[in-house]
Image (tube, grey):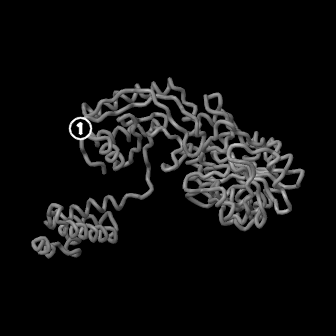
Amino acid sequence: MSDRRALLRTLPSIDRLLSTPLLTELEQTQPHILIRAAAQNTVEDLRRQILDDQAALPDLDLNAVATLIAARVVQMAKPSLRKVINVTGTLLHTNLGRAPLCKEALQAIKDVAQGYSNLEYDLDEGKRGKRFTHVEELICKLTGGEAATVVNNNAGAVMLALAALAGGRSALVSRGELIEIGGSFRIPDIMAASGVDLVEVGTTNKTHLKDYAGAIDDKTALILKVHTSNYRILGFTEAVAGEKLAELAHQHDIPVLEDLGSGLLMDLTSFGLPREPTVRETLKTGIDLVTFSGDKLLGGPQAGIIVGNRDVIDKVRKHPIARALRIDKLTLAALEATLRQYLDPQKALDKIPVLRMLSLPVAELQQRCEALLPRLTEVIGNAADAIIIEATATVGGGALPLAELPGRVIALAPKDMSLNELTTRLRSCEPAVVGRIQDDKFLIDPRTLSSDDEVFLLQALQQVFSLERCL
């Protein structure tokens, strides 16, 4: 140990390292503060390595250490949030950013971001306007609602609606709808944060109209209905239909809010998907207010959409929380562009990535695998076996939890590399590749792989199987 401690004195100083030709040249392209931080971190790592009896002694040659620092700078210079190639077969992968945007939405973001815009300016009247008006008419046209507004996400939409309509009073919710979704978002917690007292009615699997009727009192300000879009209770179950719930609520002059979670603007059962209520169908039942996400089945950016009766929407807009949750201009531009695609249903299916992926037939997935397989085997050589197999994809994002999308995938079985090493190396590539392991194989699902990204996938596989380090 004494020899190791003596070696500490030979560690080069930060200033000496920064004056090496390699790092001096690096100053031409990278910020000094980044290079200095990389040097400090590298020297500290070397110090710990020297003091670790179990670790090999590092090479403390000045140029060798400078090379380590330069490599670290390259890693530190990469953006933290960056592009990922998704071959998992999970369409709305929450950890990977959920819905990819259509080209029209991307162009709208660029147009609005690179200069000024009429975000809150009425060009016809020449005076201040409201930002939600850019999408309100579109939302109402697509859903049949009288009025609409938007906030930054659906959890915020639910919280705002609760606070505006029932703050300081109580709301009735079926016990079977007290859900928790990703990120520990729980209906009871969001109600408490909104200043609303929760009154549970019914049981976990069965709630009847009489349960709601018996719970209504002078403090009741709202009935909240939560669509169980991210799970199902099977067996002996019963829930109250929207029509009956709205009829009961209106007899007592209280509104009904339904959180659809994902929110569908068009019926997808023709593609073999489970029946889900559309926003238009939900509003037709007499429900006063509906909330849903923009970045799930809608296929747009993260947003919380609130649509329903005008008098109720007006109360929501006027609540102070509305400003804290307001949508930004880039999200608004992307949302408007996405909604415009729905004016022509076939156009929406063709252009919105999530809808296109949902509706892909098995035959087309087979063809894509057959076209990709020879290109893939060419770059990996004999380093792995690759075959086409049947596999199902999932929707993800808390939407259509029981839906299984039949398809075809390419299954890789590396010969001289563990699956864990393979996935680790793929994640270190630029762009990173994220897939799934099933039955001791790495699956590449073309359903979530865009044609434009195939070249990046092949480059990553070539680097990994040639044992090159992905940069």
Disc 1 designates what residue? Answer: 416
User: How many numbered badges does the structure rendering display?
Assistant: 1
Figure check: 363 above or below 266: above
Q: Is residue 410 left or right of residue 123?
A: left
SS state under label 1:
loop
Q: In the figure, 405 relative to 97: above or below?
A: above
User: On the rendered image, what quadrant is the N terminus found in?
Assistant: bottom left
Give the image location of residue 320, x and y in percent. Answer: 72, 68
Q: Where is residue 174 in the image (x, y as percent from the top left)?
A: 72, 50
Q: Taking the image as drawn, is residue 20 in sight?
A: yes
In-image side of 144 versus 232 (left or right): right
Q: Residue at x 66, y 66 (%)?
A: 324
Residue at the far left in the pictured view? 3
Q: Name the residue type under label 1.
A: Asp
Corner quadrant of residue 190: bottom right
Task: Identify which residue, 194 or 84, lies in the foreground.
Answer: 194
Q: Which residue is drawn at 43% across and 44% down?
A: 85
Residue at 81% of width from left, 42% of height from top? 285
